Image: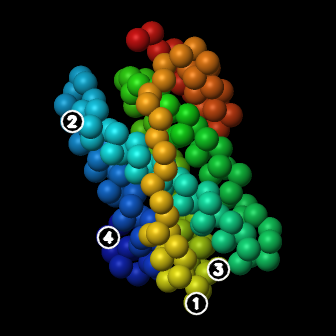
Amino acid sequence: MKPDMLRSAGPVSRFLADDHRRLEHLFHTALACTPQVEQGIYDQFRTGLLRHIGMEEKILLPTAQRLSGGAPLSIAATLRLDHGAIVALLMPTPTRNIIVTLRTILERHNLLEEGPAGLYAICDTVAQTEAEQLVARLRAAPDVAVLPHSDTPTVLGAVHRAVERAGYTLAFDSR
């Protein structure tokens, strides 16, 4: 979200778009040490992104559904497929192909969430007077447990399936 749009955005949009910027900074910083990923910073990014997705899945989307009369938002299914792909991509050790795919999905995904017709603006609209309370609940969301990376064939197969289910592709990773 552009800075001028952020100033006029509602509290939900501001809070979650700010978190996107924080996560993007961690991601870019972790990748600045090419060809290797700075693992400590990547781990901060990974933990933060999993928490962010948890906030959206466990707090934001259910609240928006409740405030919209019980029907899921039309964008919810797409966001959940993206979330599944992103979470799957965070499981294995970050290789070049994992990073490229993750970056592609995040760029498209963030466009669905930010902006005047995005998820966050929709949530600001439906929450209206409850928007500040919603942000307080998002702020209070706990960190999530993060398991060590796993590069087993089972995990890598699950990554490919989740990425494809969301409509993306992951090139064969020969490691």
Which of the two discs, 2 and 4, labels the residue nearer the N terminus?
4
Residue 174 screen position, x and y as percent: 45, 9
The residue beneath circle 3 is 126
- Which secondary structure lies at badge 2? loop
Residue neighbourhood size for the residue with mark 1, other residues' Cα within 10 Å, grouped as few (<14), some (14–19), many (≥20): few
Q: Distance between the residues labelled 3 and 2?
A: 39 Å
Q: Which residue is drawn at 55% across and 34% down?
A: 88
Residue neighbourhood size for the residue with mark 3, other residues' Cα within 10 Å, grouped as few (<14), some (14–19), many (≥20): some
Disc 1 residue type?
A: Thr
Q: Is residue 156 left or right of residue 174?
A: right
- Which secondary structure lies at badge 1? helix
Say if residue 26 shows up in the picture. Answer: yes
Residue 82 screen position, x and y as percent: 59, 44
> Furthest-top residue in view?
174
Q: How far apart are marks 1 and 4 (CA)?
A: 24 Å
The residue beneath circle 4 is 3
Q: Of circles 3 and 1, which is in front? A: 1
Which of the two discs, 1 and 2, labels the residue nearer the N terminus?
2
